[in-house]
Image (spheres, rainbow, N blue to C red):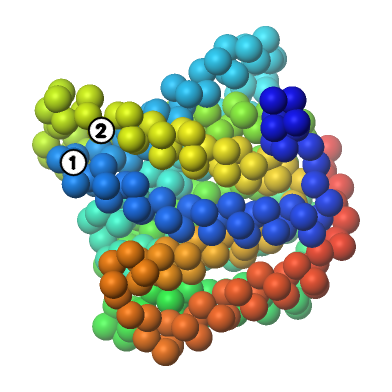
Amino acid sequence: MIWFLSLFTREYEQRQALLIIFLASSFWGVLWVPMRHIEAMGLSGLWVVVLFHFLPAVAMLPLIVKAAQSSRRDWGRAAFAGALMGAGFALYALGLVVASVTKTVILFYMTPIWSTVIAYFVLRERAGWGRWLAIAAALVGCALVTGVNRDELRFDPADLLGLLSGLFWALGSVMIRRYDGLNFVHVSFLQYLFGGIMALIAAIYLGDPIPQLAVLLQAIPPAFLASAVVFLPSVLLIFRIMQYVSPGLVGILMLSEALVAAVSAAFWLGETLAPMQWIGVTAILATGVFIGFYEGKAVKSAKPA
């Protein structure tokens, strides 16, 4: 058990950390499978998002109670970072419901751009030509994988959900790195809590039918298994690594989620990826390999006081 817990608290060597980010984010790419399963049980998409936020938060309560002695300042900082990231994910989920799925995904995954720019001003972290090249290649790959076309390039007010989701997530990731010594468990818990509250408000505001008690009780066990037992460890790993790896790098490698989502959907749903989508898959994979070699030996930059 101690060995297992040490996986979430240790500081990994740079290349190991980058690989973990890539693989853990890839794991998120199949999150749609259990969410679709829960939705088929009679819950709307937003109520599924509510469950997938509140259940991990409940699972983390023993850890939170144990760490309740943290200073008020630490909790305030964790709440700030957690609220930003919770808002980012909730806006992303809402965008998938009310806006273009393709544009929401693309706009959210502009996160590496926002993270790199914000990190320059907040962390004094400079990005070399290789980082910007990787961002461009990864975004092109994401656009190809999601199948964006000319007709979808027109701006719609609902597209602000995708744009703001990526911006909030980027701000949160920079704050996690900015506040040295921040408890990543607190941030993860508060991200789930704030995200769940926002998803709940959105579900009620949009008039999604409140699930019947029998349906909810039936959905909770598989939703808890998927969100809290299977996926929560990957979230904790990523939030821990965010404390010492560049937010821009994290954003680039998290594009692997879009890659796995597209490939897994093709596999499970019997869809066929077009040649351009396979080129996009290759571009994202190549970006991950390039980042691993180009910045794999980068040292942790000093944080501002």
Instruction: In the rendered structure, find residue 41 and report the number of the disc placed on it.
Output: 1
Answer yes or no: is residue 15 visible: yes
Q: Horizontally, is 196 left or right of 213 in the view? A: right
User: In front here: 99 or 294?
Assistant: 294
Quarter that holds the C terminus: top right
For image coordinates 22% across by 25% down, the residue present is 217
Q: Quadrant of residue 130?
A: bottom right
Instruction: In the rendered structure, find residue 109 and report the number of the disc placed on it.
Output: none
For image coordinates 58% across by 12% down, the residue present is 65
Q: Horizontally, is 174 left or right of 36 in the view? A: right
The residue type indicated by label 2 comes to Ala
Q: Are marks 2 and 1 in contact (CB under 8 Å)?
A: yes
The residue type indicated by label 1 comes to Met
**Relative height, residue 20 to residue 190 (above, below):** below
Q: Position of residue 49 (x, y in %)?
A: 32, 41
- Alpha-carbon span between mark 2 and mark 1: 7 Å
- SS of the residue at dot 2? helix
Whichever of labels 2 and 1 marks the residue nearer the N terminus, that label is 1
For image coordinates 71% across by 49% down, the residue present is 122
Q: Position of residue 10 (x, y in %)?
A: 79, 37
Quarter that holds the N terminus: top right
Residue ID for mark 2: 219
- SS of the residue at dot 1? loop
Q: Residues within 10 Å of mark 1 (few under 14, many from 20)?
A: few
**Relative height, residue 157 to residue 184 (above, below):** below
User: In front here: 245 or 11?
Assistant: 11
Q: Quadrant of residue 137?
A: bottom right
User: In front here: 90 or 259?
Assistant: 259
For image coordinates 28% across by 67% down, the residue present is 269
